[in-house]
Image: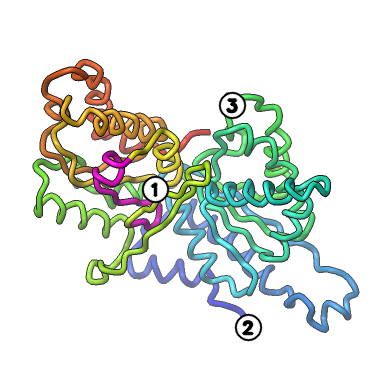
């Protein structure tokens, strides 16, 4: 039984004025509708029709949706994923998917039974015939080295891939170390997926942020309420259900897990104490920066020699968020230039002050999340 066509869902959002007319989005919906219809036309695995045909159906060609931040890429893919009525489907943030892949490869290598990639591909193909990835981005040589064989294997196994990215395929892993290892992946994407641009006139994410203040002073109920309202606006989560906002555990490497108290649609909420008072390092903060396009932090105190370790961790956190162009909203007991007023370490904190001020600028807020 077919699900509701994604084109109908999109038209309903336009009629309700939740979305604005956008030629790029309309073209993307047409492409997604094609994929939905093709996937739903294939009978379930093991059905009598498969035995009648005597062979596997041809794989359905996937999509690569790319464009600037806030243009509706994730929303389009979410609509599609909800609408497509097939049993074996999976949606994942691309970074989390690659962490899963590396974990599976580690298990296969431990078996010492040869090339670890084919069994991982086989398992994934058994689990899902539709894989949807949000925010494809390549930041390290480990991912770059395996992606070509991984994606070639999945597509050959009949898996349909739909992914979003802030970049055109030609710009993935741009200037990355040993980029030549990744070039076959780019060729594969361009050969096997339809490339669809979403660079319409409306930046929905920036529009939803509106005129919300990104740095609130002082800490307290008023600042927390303001940041909470911004969170619900960014994520479309009903405020009346605030007690049930999803949390998440993310793998930061080395077998360590970081708990995210509130995590929804690429937005994370933390307290200063959770991220900076506990013993954390660059790996934790880079994992957060890669995973979330927006981080909200409450409870930042005045810093100085009396809380030197917390201040040092805060500097490392801001460096990571800045590198990945993460939007940072916070409540604190002082403005950025008064956050570390005096004492040993004040001079080194000047760069962090400069970054915090830049991160409040319209130019920074309009930047896309992530890197190559």
Task: Give the class, few, some or many, for how many residues have Cα within 10 Å of label 1's Cα (few <14, many ≥20).
Answer: many
- Which residue is under mark 1? 70
The Cα–Cα distance between marks 3 and 1, rounded to whole angstroms, is 25 Å
Residue 176 has which mark? 3
Residue in view at x 55 percent, y 60 percent: 91
Distance CA(mark 2)–CA(mark 3): 45 Å
Question: What separation in Å lies between label 1 and label 2 (alpha carbons)?
Answer: 33 Å
Determine whether 240 is above or below 190 in the image.
below
The colour scheme applied to this rendered structure is rainbow
Q: Is residue 329 within the magenta segment?
A: no
Q: Is mark 2 on a helix, strand or loop?
A: loop
Q: Which of marks 3 and 1 is nearer the N terminus?
A: 1
The tag earlier along the polypeptide, 1 or 2, is 2
Q: Point out residue 112 in the picture as x, y percentages from the top left corner.
A: 80, 46
Q: Which badge, 2 or 3, comes first in the chain's sequence?
A: 2
Q: Is residue 37 above or below residue 51?
A: above
Q: Do the residues labelled 3 and 1 touch (CB within 8 Å)?
A: no
Start and end of the magenta stretch? 262-278
Image disc number at residue 1: 2
Q: Which residue is drawn at 22% across and 28% down?
A: 308
In this picture, residue 240 sits left or right of residue 38: left
Res 50 label: none
């Amino acid at each position: 039984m077919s699900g509701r066509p994604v084109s109908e869902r999109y038209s309903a959002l336009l009629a309700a004025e939740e979305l604005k007319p956008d030629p790029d989005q309309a073209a993307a919906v047409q492409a997604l509708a094609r994929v939905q219809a093709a996937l739903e036309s294939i009978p379930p695995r093991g059905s009598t029709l498969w035995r009648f045909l005597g062979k596997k159906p041809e794989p359905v060609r996937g999509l690569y949706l790319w464009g600037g931040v806030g243009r509706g890429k994730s929303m389009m893919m979410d609509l599609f994923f909800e609408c497509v009525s097939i049993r074996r489907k999976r949606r994942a943030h691309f970074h989390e998917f690659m962490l899963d892949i590396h974990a599976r490869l580690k298990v296969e290598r431990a078996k010492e039974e040869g090339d670890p990639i084919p069994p991982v591909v086989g398992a994934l193909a058994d689990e899902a015939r539709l894989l949807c990835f949000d925010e494809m981005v390549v930041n390290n040589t480990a991912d770059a080295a395996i992606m070509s064989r991984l994606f070639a294997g999945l597509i050959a196994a009949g898996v349909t891939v739909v992914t979003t990215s802030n970049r055109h395929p030609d710009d993935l892993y741009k200037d990355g170390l040993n980029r030549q290892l990744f070039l076959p992946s780019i060729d594969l994407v361009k050969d096997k997926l339809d490339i669809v641009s979403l660079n319409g006139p409306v930046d929905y994410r920036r529009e939803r942020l509106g005129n919300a203040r990104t740095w609130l002073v002082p800490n307290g109920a008023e600042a927390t309420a303001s940041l909470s309202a911004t969170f619900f606006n960014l994520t479309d989560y009903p405020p009346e259900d605030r007690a049930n906002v999803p949390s998440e555990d993310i793998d930061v490497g080395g077998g360590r897990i970081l708990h995210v108290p509130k995590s929804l649609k690429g937005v994370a909420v933390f307290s200063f104490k959770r991220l900076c008072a506990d013993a954390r390092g660059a790996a934790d903060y880079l994992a957060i920066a890669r995973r979330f396009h927006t981080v909200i932090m409450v409870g930042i105190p005045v810093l100085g020699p009396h809380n030197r370790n917390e201040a040092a961790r805060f500097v490392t956190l801001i460096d990571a968020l800045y590198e990945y162009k993460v939007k940072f909203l916070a409540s604190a007991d002082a403005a950025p230039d008064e956050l570390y007023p005096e004492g040993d370490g004040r001079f080194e904190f000047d760069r962090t002050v400069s970054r915090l001020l830049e991160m409040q600028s319209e130019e920074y807020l309009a930047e896309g999340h992530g890197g190559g």
